[in-house]
Image (cartoon, rainbow, N blue to C red):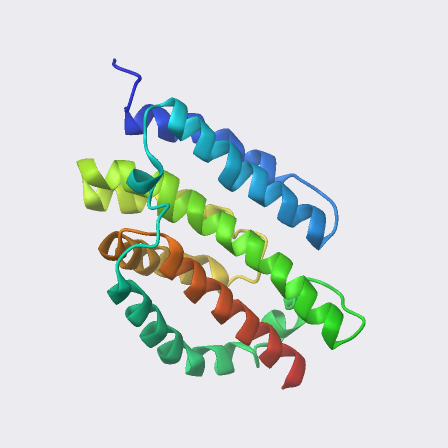
Amino acid sequence: MRLKRNPWVLYVALMPFILIVRYSGGGIFRWAGYNFIFYFAAPLLLARLFGFKPAELGVQIGKKDGYKWALILFLLTIPLSLYGANVPSMKEYYPIFEYSGWGDFFLKELAVGVIMFSHEAFYRGIILFPLARKNEWLGILAQDIPYTLVHIGKPGIEVPYSFVAGIIFAKLDLKSESFIPSFLLHWFGSVLFDLLCVLL
């Protein structure tokens, strides 16, 4: 089996990073650091060693239509966010950090942004793009299954929701040729949901 530029060998090599992040500890800022290192920097370096260029991993600005669709999807999910913010298990769980005031709240939302960036880079970029070039739907499922599994332990509704979202994010990013649109959609949606949980 040829190791260089083999997306499935890369896929297997990337799986341990999920466990490293899953069992990393510390507060929101330390966790953001772990995510950035083990979901973005180290996997990107590993993929480069396998012969993949950043653009082949979705690490680029991409097509502007992706950002338009991300905005449309964000607007369409607002009613769902309003409903979810009134579900007791979600309201108790989010935001995932404690805060002392609005300044602290938004500073920690920036840390959440780093986490979201790293997640999208890993699942919808470094894992997805090399596999999808061989088989689009197999690549989408290959990134979506571990992405869904890492949501176990969060409020139960998040597991099926994350599975559906993982497919939508993947299709969006493949059309965009970048993971950035799903990152922005994921992060802005997360900030809005946290605000709704706090204010409602």
Of 87 and 34, nearer the camera is 34
Q: Is residue 85 above or below residue 39?
A: below
Residue drawn at (31%, 60%) of the image: 168
Residue 63, located in which quarter of the rendered image?
bottom left
- In the displayed image of the protein, which residue is found farthest to the top? 1
Q: Is residue 71 above or below residue 97?
A: below
For image coordinates 32% across by 67% down, the residue present is 67
In the rendering, at what x and y percent does residue 103 appear? 74, 73
Where is residue 7 drawn, in percent x and y? 29, 29
Q: Is residue 189 left or right of residue 110?
A: left
Q: Residue 52: name its quadrant.
A: top left
Residue 132 at x, y = what percent?
23, 41
Q: Residue furthest bottom?
A: 200
Tally of numbered discs: 0
For the C terminus, give its image quadrant.
bottom right
Instruction: Determine whether 184 is above or below 83 in the image.
Output: above
- Quadrant housing residue 191: bottom right
On the picture, is 28 further left or further right than 112? right
Q: Nearer the viewer, residue 156 or 188?
A: 188
Could you tell whether 85 is left or right of 140 in the image? right
Q: Residue at x 34, y 58 (%)?
A: 169
Q: Is residue 181 visible?
A: yes
Residue 148 visible from this viewpoint:
no
In the rendered image, which quarter contains the N terminus? Answer: top left
